[in-house]
Amino acid sequence: MMSLESVPPKYAQLVQTLQRRIESGTYPPGSLLPSENQLIQEFGVSRPTVVAALRVLREQGWIESQQGKGRFVLGRPAMSSVEQNRPGRAYLTNPETDASGELIEAGAVAAPNRVAALLELQPKSRAFLRRRLIVRDGEPTELVSLWLPLELSEGTDLTSGEPLPDGLRGHLRSRKGVRFDHIVEQITARMPTAGEAKQLAMPKNTPLLAVFGSVRDASGRPLVVVEVLLPADRHELEDAYPIG
């Protein structure tokens, strides 16, 4: 699972606590999970917070609901929604309205060398950039840049200052008929530029984690590069994958 929030919302904290209890055997497979009221009392949270946490656990396969009986523990799923939690994927598939933030830049710019290479463009070529600063709990937490070949951006709403309600994947599918097939992800660390440090309110001498996701169609043609810049003092990347 990739944990990308410096201070996760309350429901996410509850999800993590319940997952740890299931993994440690406090709630063994087959046992009945405490009721909503019990969880509300124990953790001092609201009912919507508990309901949201239980929905996530059910969707990820940790628990199951049985009508009239309650929620039963299934145990740790073999691959508990690792795919959904990768940062690149989240910003490609989720509606932009899911993450509060502001649009900083939208238009054609010279693509950096790494982005040009991932999009298979000639060096110094121009590409379309849509960059947003994501804010959580009133603090800037990440810079998300979507890079596209210019022809793929034409006839879209990517220059709009409004968040995309259907997410980039849905928007490009409806407007341009393209389908995302797979993502090749790279993670690097570097020092921020002065502008990045200012936008992200980073303390001096703090490195950035840069996550690059190159999105391709089924034929392997690059469609989009998503670049997520994360202050290293506020984020932790965790991954899980099957061993064949």
Image: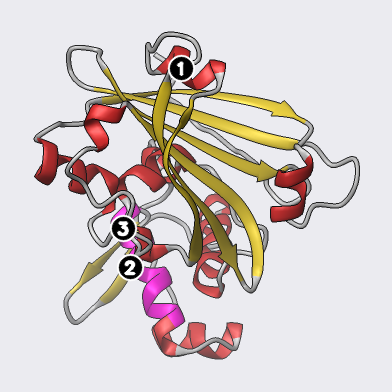
Quadrant housing residue 176:
top left
Amino acid type at mark 3:
Pro
Residue at image position (50%, 15%) is 124
Marks 1 and 3: which is nearer the front?
1
Viewer-closest of 23 and 205: 205
Amino acid type at mark 1:
Ala
Tag of residue 95: 3
| Secondary structure that dominates the magenta span | helix
Judging from the image, what secondary structure is the residue with disc 3 in? Answer: loop
Compared across the picture, whether 21 is left or right of 121 comes to right
From this viewpoint, is residue 3 visible?
no
Residue at image position (18%, 18%) is 218
Q: Residues within 10 Å of mark 3 (few under 14, many from 20)?
A: some
Q: Residues within 10 Å of mark 1 (few under 14, many from 20)?
A: many
Residue at image position (79%, 42%) is 194
Q: Residues within 10 Å of mark 2 (few under 14, many from 20)?
A: some
* Magenta stretch: includes residue 94: no
Tag of residue 116: 1
Q: Are marks 1 and 3 in contact (CB under 8 Å)?
A: no
Q: Is residue 44 above or below residue 96?
A: below
**Upstream in the sequence, badge 1 or badge 2?**
2
* Magenta stretch: includes residue 59: yes
Viewer-closest of 142 and 6: 142
Judging from the image, what secondary structure is the residue with disc 1 in? Answer: helix
Report which residue position mark 2 lands on. Answer: 55
**Upstream in the sequence, badge 1 or badge 3?**
3
Compared across the picture, whether 179 is left or right of 133 comes to left
**Upstream in the sequence, badge 2 or badge 3?**
2
The answer for how far apart the CA atoms under marks 2 and 3 are is 19 Å
Q: Which residues are magenta?
A: 49-61
